[in-house]
Image (cartoon, helix red, strand yellow):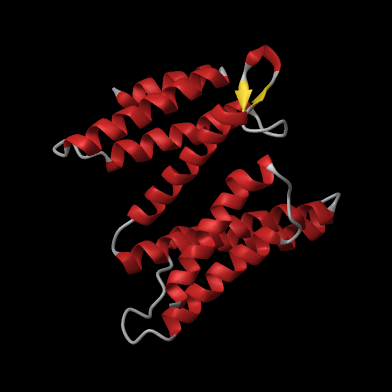
């Protein structure tokens, strides 16, 4: 139960960070609440599990954690604005914790389809929002909201194409038709953002 709740909090975290705060408004402490909650529930589920209760900590995570410690302590000596250093280091640690979560959930499921489907769902939500009531900025470039960058939005749509290609099943006709149409909508929306790099990238990805 706790494991499923941790995955649910991850979905809420992803939606909040990638969509909600840009389209509506930021909520103070929400990333910490959702991110901390999903990791705590994952840890509790692992500790109470009778099997597979060991955490997976790859060497890169250990190296990055050592780098985090180095940033915190060296910043005392070299940083002009130590508060800014701590803020940056804290953001770095948040990303590191998220990587730890992804690695261990993938290890438990023995599959990474949960994260692929999660990012695909987020990309679809972003695309629908942009096509329905997206913000039209300078140069008639569409974006998710007035606070976002069209190049960044196009990158999120590019992730959607990537995830769609992974999940496509050529031997199942309905799945193939639906996924192909979805990819077509992604490409159309990317073109509307005016991001030339993303257009080139999606063409290379398809090839």
Please state the horizontal and vertical placement of residue 68, each as a whole percent of the image. 63, 60
Q: Residue at x 61, y 64 (%)?
A: 34
Q: Is residue 87 visible?
A: yes
In the rendered image, residue 201, in percent from the top left (x then y), is placed at 42, 24
Q: Nearer the viewer, residue 113 or 12?
A: 12
Vertical position of residue 59 compared to residue 171: above or below: below
Q: Nearer the viewer, residue 199 or 24?
A: 24
- Write the residue at 22% across / 36% down: 174
User: Can you say whether 83 is above or below 196 in the image?
Assistant: below
Quadrant housing residue 200: top left
Q: Residue furthest front?
A: 132
Question: Which quarter of the rendered picture does the C terminus lie within?
Answer: top left
Q: In front: 159, or 53? A: 159
On the image, the x and y values in percent for residue 98 come to 53, 59
Q: Residue at x 42, y 23 (%)?
A: 187
- In the orientation shown, which residue stands out farthest toward the top? 139
């Amino acid at each position: 139960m706790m494991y499923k709740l941790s995955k649910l909090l991850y979905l809420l975290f992803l939606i909040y960070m990638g969509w909600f705060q840009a389209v509506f408004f930021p909520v103070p402490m929400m990333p910490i609440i959702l991110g901390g909650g999903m990791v705590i529930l994952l840890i509790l589920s692992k500790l109470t599990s009778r099997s597979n209760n060991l955490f997976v900590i790859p060497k890169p995570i250990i190296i990055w954690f050592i780098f985090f410690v180095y940033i915190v302590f060296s910043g005392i000596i070299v940083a002009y604005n130590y508060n800014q250093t701590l803020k940056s280091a804290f953001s770095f640690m948040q990303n590191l914790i998220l990587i730890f979560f992804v690695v261990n959930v993938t290890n438990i499921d023995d599959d990474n389809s949960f994260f692929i489907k999660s990012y695909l769902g987020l990309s679809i939500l972003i695309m629908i929002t942009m096509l329905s009531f997206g913000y039209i900025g300078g140069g008639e470039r569409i974006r998710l909201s007035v606070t976002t960058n069209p190049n960044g939005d196009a990158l999120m749509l590019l992730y959607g194409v990537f995830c769609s290609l992974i999940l496509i099943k050529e031997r199942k006709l309905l799945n193939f038709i639906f996924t192909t149409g979805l990819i077509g909508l992604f490409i159309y929306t990317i073109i509307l953002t005016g991001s030339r790099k993303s257009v080139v990238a999606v063409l290379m990805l398809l090839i």
